[in-house]
Image (cartoon, coloured by chain):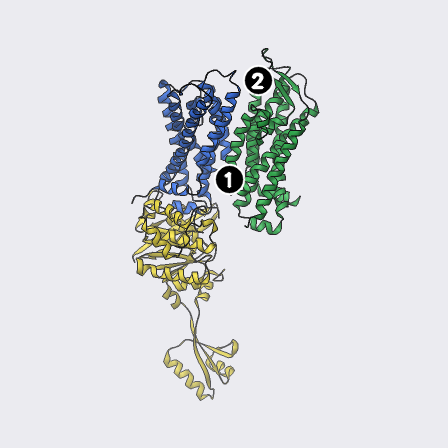
Chain colours: A yellow, B blue, C green
Amino acid sequence: MDCCIQTRGLTKTYGKAAVVQSLDLAVPRGSVYGFLGPNGAGKTTTMKMLLGLVHPSAGTATVLGRQVTPRSHVQINARVGSLIESPSCYPHLTARENLEVVRSLRGLPASSIDEALAVVRLGHTGGKPVRAFSLGMRQRLGLAAALLGDPELLLLDEPTNGLDPAGIQEIRELIRSLPTERGCTVLVSSHLLSEVEQMSDYVGIINHGRMAWQGPLGELHARARRWLELRTTDNERAARLLGASCADGGWVRVRMRDDESVARMTMGLAREGIGIVRLEERHEDLEDIFIALTGTEASL
Amino acid sequence: MRASALRAELVKLHRAPIWAAFVLLPVVAAAIGTFNYMGNLAILQSGWFDLWTQHTLFSGMIFLHALIGASCSWLMGLEHRGTNWNQLMASPTGALRILASKLLVAWLMLGVGLAVTGVLFVGCGRFAGLPGLPGFGYVLWLVLAWVGGLASIACQLLVSLLIRNFAAPVGIAAIGGLVGFFAHAYDMGLAWPYALLVMALNSNGNGAVGAGQLMAFLASTVAFAGAFMMIATLVVAGTDVRTSS
Amino acid sequence: MRCLGLEFAKLRRKHVTLVVLAIVAATLAWLYADAHGEGAGSAVGWHSLFFAAPIMNSVFLSLLSSVVASRVVDVDHEADAWKQLLCLQGTGSLLLAKLACAMLVIGLAVALELVGIFSIGSAWKFFDQPALRSWGVLALSQVAASLCMVSIVGAVALVWESQFVAITCGLALSLAGLFSSFLPTALQRLVPSGYYTLLTTMRVDWGSGSGVPLFSEATLPVLDYALASAFSIAACLFAYVTFSRREI
């Protein structure tokens, strides 16, 4: 697999507390990788190590084919856009002037600013200093700074913080479109499962600094347990005959089977004079898998 | 287009004309110094040089250093705020270039301050009825003070990098300048970063930096400025980024 | 009282004590040099110290006042806490608590300085130690002048969020204060930091010709105290009015 980011045993400890432990992260090129975990799981610290902002205690990180070291990260970062923690800004400057700072540091053409402002729809803020911006507007400015100059890789740390519902939807769609429209790989962290599910095609679930699971979103769905539930004219007898449990709300729960055995089961019940009123296929949702993997609620 | 950390620093000065303070301070020094000079003509009889002393003695001893300290605090405080270090260090610009551009910006502002000092000196001298124009030596002193100021700027950038508080570095600068004044008085000026500016200004009439001392003066400036920038670069590049949110 | 405690709590780990110690130490170093010049057992040693201390203070204590004033105000700019605080406290009591907090810190600095002066004078065995009243007048004058500085710089710090403005203003005033004692009294009264010397009672006549300075103690300059108070009150009112009008 061609990976934009690959870490091996990446570890960060502060004193005795391990914030990130032996993390093996693999972000495939051209994907939107959802980095999911409860608050304080180590998402931000991991992203900071990928940018060279924090130095790992052990392990290595390779970003865009080069190992991140105190020397190399400056060159790597020329190809990486990022928004870590809350957006960085100089409050006494306008949106345009703030981007001017980033543009100068990255050595980009002047046109890149208008483009980035248009993408996040901040073109109208004119001479207003960022001090007077709402939380959502600052977040948009942070995104514009990250998008400046079409980077090959974007690291976005909870990018929808502080946005209103319409803004959240807009930004999710923007992120979703980045790989196809700009050929950009995105690592986006979130503590919201539903958000990751909407945006990403790869998922990494981190908990207490350790990777609990990572792989394509489809595979996560495939991990979901499936079963059948039926409602009959005599649930108790049906349950006894099928050796199944009687679930809440008057449903009988049975193991998932192939079509033939399901047909046999229904006919068998009919022979016993039990009528089948409903027959439904059920599966675990991602929320359940997430809780099973991390032991915490999906959205904190 | 080439990345320019200096350009980024200059953009940050938009809407925050902190260089204006480098105009204000010499104006206060010149106004009061001239007034004082004119009130004491009976004792002060060395003409231009007495006026020079009145204008520059105390600003060179404490206040110019404190102002340098305040500017460095401001320049570093910009980055200490919120998550700004993240953005700065995640850019493809190395720590040394970022710090060097801050050094340059502060140095330019000091240049403004010294230029204003020079202009006010001549203007006030004419106003006070001093004959002719001051000698070329004063220009040289100002230029040397500008050069020597690099050492105290580099030192203050390091101090403000380490101490995130605004005022404490200003106090350190003021005391540094004061110590510099005494270091110079006891002929140890070359060994103390803040003393170089004091030495060059020659406000106390201890004698200007002469041709014989020039190389030592420049070497000391370069050594101090270089060492402080090096330490600051190592601190920025070698430690984890700390954000304040 | 509770508000005052809160202000001190906010200053924790802000190194205020360190700044106080450093600035008092610088003042005392200077005074020590001055005492050194007088020589042991000097008859005018105490007078000289009492005369020099306010001049030093017009530089150092005015600097400290600016730093402390800007610090107690900025702590809430920094935390972006005004909107939260003003839901819980009135503007008046909040600003008053900040003023009181700054003045207590200044009071500490003045007390330390007086202890220092006493030690220096005693160490050099200066003749004829001043009466308690003189010490009291010196302390009062320095605290009153600092109140003036704290109010003015504090008001500036409230209006301009950047500490750079308040500190630069303090520096300019401090520089002006240094020279102000050489200005004619009428002009000196216009310089807030000039009150460090104006409010004291020690006067000197540089002994025209004889070369021996003649020290004398004047009566308490009531008019100057009134002016200094007026400056302080005006600055506080300005701060209160502009701040309570401003929408956060």
Residue positioned 35% across, 45% down in the render: A104
The chain letter for the residue carrying disc 2 is: C
Q: Dividing the image into 4 quarters, which one contains the N terminus of chain B?
A: top left
Residue A138 vertical placement versus C186 (above, below): below
Choose the circle earlier in sequence order: 1 or 2. Answer: 2
Front residue of C60/A261: it is C60
Decide if residue C83 is in sight here: yes
The chain letter for the residue carrying disc 1 is: C
Query: For numbered disc 2, what is the local secondary structure?
Result: helix
Residue positioned 42% across, 84% down in the render: A266
Residue positioned 54% across, 36% down in the render: C67
Q: Residues within 10 Å of mark 1 (few under 14, many from 20)?
A: many
Q: Amino acid at mark 2?
A: His
Residue positioned 55% across, 20% down in the render: C33
For marks 1 and 2, give the one nearer the viewer.
Answer: 1
Q: Are marks 1 and 2 in contact (CB under 8 Å)?
A: no
What is the x, y in percent for residue A71?
A: 34, 42
Could you tell me how far apart the alpha carbons at marks 1 and 2 are, in whole angstroms? 38 Å
Decide if residue A148 is in sight here: no
**Count of numbered labels shown in the rendering:** 2
Residue A178 vertical placement versus C122 (above, below): below
What is the x, y in percent for residue A182?
A: 31, 57
Which of the numbered marks, if any, corresponds to residue B175? Answer: none
Q: Are marks 1 and 2 on the same chain?
A: yes
Q: Amino acid at mark 1?
A: Gln
Which of the numbered marks, if any, corresponds to residue C36? Answer: 2
What is the x, y in percent for residue B27?
A: 47, 30
Which residue lies under the disc numbered 1? Answer: C163
